[in-house]
Image (spheres, grey):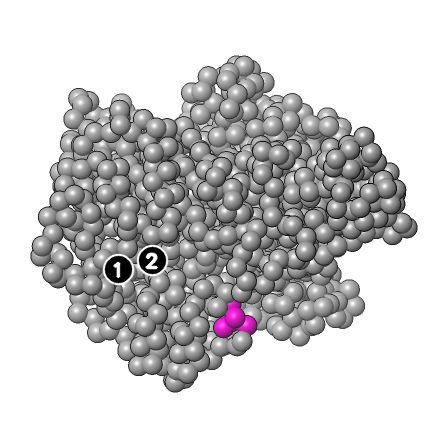
Amino acid sequence: MSQYSWPDPATQPLLGKKILRIDGPSKSSGRAKYTYDYNPDGLLAGKIVRCPYAHARITSIDTSAAEKMPGVKAIEIVQKPGTEIFWAGDEIVGVAAVDEGTAEDAVRAIKVGYEVLPHFVSDAEPPKNLAPDTGPISQDDFESMEDNQVPDDEAIAILKKQGVSFTADEKWYKSMEGEGTDPKVIAALRAAKVLPPSESKSPYKRTATQKQGDPDKAFASAAATHEGVYGVPCIVHCCMESHGSASEWGGSNDLTVHISTQNLSGIAAQMAEPLNTPAANIRVLQQNIGGGFGSKFAADRWDIVAAKLSKSAGGKPVKMMLTREEEFEVAGMRPSAYARVKLAADKSGKLVAWQSNSWGTGGMGGGGTPPIPYIFDVPNQRKQHTAVATNQGSARAWRAPNHPQAALITMAAFEDLAAQLKMDPVDMLRANMDILGPRAKTYAEELEIAEQLMGWKQNWHPRGDKTAGPVKRGLGLSIHTWGGRGHNSDQDLSIHPDGSVDLKVGSQDLGTGTRTIIAMVIADTLGIPLEQVTVHIGDNRYPPSGGSGGSTTVGGVSSAARRGAVDARDMLLEKVAPALKAKPEELEVANGVVRVKTDPSRSLSWKDACAKIGAVPLTVRGKNPDKSKPPDLTNSGVGGVQMADVSVDAETGIVRVNKMVAVQDCGLVVNVETAESQVKGALIMGISYALYEEKILDPVTGRVLNPNLEFYRLAGLNDVGELVVHMMTGKGYDDRGVIGLAEPPVVSPGAAISNAVANAIGVRVPFLPLTPARVIDALEQGGVA
Amino acid sequence: MADDRPRKPEDNSGVTRRDFMKVSAVGVAVPVVLGSVMDAAAEEVPIQGPGKVPITLQVNGKKLSAQLEPRVTLLDALRDNFDLTGAKRVCDRGACGACTVLMDGKPVYACAILAIDAQGRMITTIEALAEGDSLSPVMQAFVAHDAQQCGFCTPGFIVTTTNFLQKQPAPTAEEIRHGLSGNFCRCGTYDGIRAVALAHAGGKQS
């Protein structure tokens, strides 16, 4: 049995060091090609006629004028007359033409008739006294119950009582099991009655109240109770490269798709059925992706349309990239979440009771349920959530789904309660360590480091900066967690007889440094320089690898790379052993040589050693063990602590972030350089959603009012203060294996910044983003100014 | 100040020649469509299009010609017709800077300029900033400071930064904040980009 376990990073030239990304030069020179850059001869431009109404029924479609236009090569009706449309921007007709201008003209020439229906786009607080929904549980409902960690016996009781409205395939059950759903719950799900879905016309879907302990008694005897309302609006992914793809057919049944995707190995299977083409005939390619953040897992309807248009146009390539406005309407968003919270503590600051009525929207599906109270296992709880269905494009996973909302709601209430108790929130957090779950020790260690890096003790003051002048300064904190166990990843590693090494895997590099991490692991394990390893990704003819979501890539690809490289190394040593007159187990690789461990003078250069391989390369399949087995090289569960230092101008309401501190655990850090970059990126994204971002829907037209980058504001370089990142390493961290990092650090910034603003001005700004208007409104209610 | 008074809508119809000149001087990309302005300018404006017209651009020291509709932007001409895809299309309305190129040595948003208006100007794209197969010093610095993640905004940022550092070789932190705030990045690489500019200034490397 080979020893796959990770070596001590201190003994390795690359592992755990700061290594620059290997694809850096291609990106900075502008030579890196993205899907949007695909530009073959004869390329046709794809465009889509989209519904201008938030709710309507198609009554007629007339494409005759467009068909006659010179340069129009194909037209594809996506949704037929009679179809009900539930959000503005939904796809109606696709067009392919010789260039974009012609395609846009054709879109304008297509006449679509609509019966306009009433729409609803408000995620304001639902009316009181709504009856709980007792209808059958949908697939979305169930997944959201699991996301929200509804206790198993409660979930089983609900399934028994209410039934389900769906039949799932085995693959789905397997995936739920893989994500940790208890087998007893799966059994209850399989046994549940299948009923027709509820026909309710109400946009509100109120879940049953969940209870734990005795909240009434706990509130009655608490030393302090705070009540507040908090929330986060819908925001958009805003990938720099919009969604889209280019499709072309070779022959009638052989498709090549260039697509901007986080899920390269999963695309062919999604396109096969709608295109009536075997997945085996669909080639999927992508070298670089301009951002995904959770919004690019699917072969979208526009991708299918592009492929159909290409087929109609005789197989010519059709490129369909969304415009920025389309991105805002149909390409995904993060669900909103709001809550009225009542939180109580004893006089030591220990939380004793939580009550919440939460609501939010994620489009017609209603959106996710934030897992509140976040992290704190408050002993006595009563909570109830109402999903609001709105006529807007559906939510998609947005970096750490549901966690940033849950963190804001929980940590803001926590900090408000601390202020009421006149406690330093750091002390109050320490008073609650025993209800912080499995990562409590991590939080305790991180809190100490964050406190130092922020100068918390010197700079923190009780709520409300009492210094003179309009600019008030404050500090805030938050904590977060995430799973992040590595996904499945199959990789083919070849050592060639000339000493060169390459690896093929159907993965993708979102800018996180996936290529670099794989190359580092291979190079260290084989004892050769990084430059000698070539990593091929971005082609579904390579062995399949999981989608890059939920912080699963680094753990997945690094573990499989390690396994493959260990096996390949051991095979090589067997071939080389006779030449060195030693047994294979007496040999080691290091610094570009194969040598006898006890007598390093008996050695062969890497090149000479590889010459012993023979005529064809030595190829090994690296593969992670089944998910049902306990993880070895990867793991699940990380903790992070963040602190924010802000200045608020109490006259203008403008908030500036002076400094952010992020102390983050992700198990064994493979590449400190790219890990720190990713945490800094998360802090910046967090500053952006904390201060600026909000998808605004017009109640009258049901359309997005700010579907562009002028009025949907992203943080710029000028908006970002000092960023301090500390990665937890060493004992207790390195030995846990490699764990994902993308999601966790983006969870806390909103809460930490909101808390810092409250600390500065002495009053809570209840909702993100913390715009000048909201700050001024809050100050009208009290505070320092 | 008089200029701060809210204007009634009808005020806009009486654009003075001085206002017009001020507007024109802001940048070639500002479309001015008021009939009265055309009269005031009193110049013959040749009608171009609809339909394709011959357009010749001076790009990276080469003359590039194509038949293009007058509505085609400089960005789309560069990307679609001349396969210079380093400049990216992100917002397509002059907000994000991902399409930044140099025009007569100044950084401009190529998505906000019509190709037909860019004729006779010297256009330089990211492709010409690299020195053969090797990287320019600013590109090298972006790699060395890991000032890129997905890389989609990177070419625009590098064109902007290159020009900024030529004008201000030793910028202060404050000058960097303002000089490089015309481009957006979604992955959050600003800290690395600041480090690039600070290192150039001989400041402390991060």
Q: Which residue is mark 2?
A: A370
* The C terminus of chain A: image quadrant: top left
| Residues shaded magenta | A171-175
Is any atom of residue B69 visible in this view? Answer: no
Q: Residue at x 23, y 57 (%)?
A: A379
Question: In the depicted view, which residue is nearer to us: A358 or A210?
Answer: A210
Query: Looking at the picture, does residue B48 appear above or below residue B197?
Result: below
Q: Residue at x 53, y 16 (%)?
A: B201
Q: Residue at x 61, y 51 (%)?
A: A559
Which callout, 1 or 2, points at the residue further toward the start of the chain?
1
Marks 1 and 2 sit apart, C-alpha to C-alpha, by 8 Å
Q: Chain of mark 1?
A: A
Q: Secondary structure at mark 1?
A: strand
Identify the disc placed on residue A358.
Answer: 1
Q: Is residue A367 left or right of residue A110?
A: left
Q: Chain of mark 2?
A: A
The amino acid marked with disc number 1 is: Ser
Q: Position of residue A598 (x, y in %)?
A: 74, 35
Image label count: 2
Q: Residue at x 68, y 69 (%)?
A: A279
Binning the other alpha carbons within 10 Å of mark 1 as few (below 14), some (14 to 19) or many (20 upward) gives many
The amino acid marked with disc number 2 is: Pro
Query: Looking at the picture, does residue B136 appear above or below residue A159?
Result: above
Binning the other alpha carbons within 10 Å of mark 2 as few (below 14), some (14 to 19) or many (20 upward) gives many
Q: Is residue A549 left or right of residue A68?
A: left
Q: Secondary structure at mark 2?
A: loop
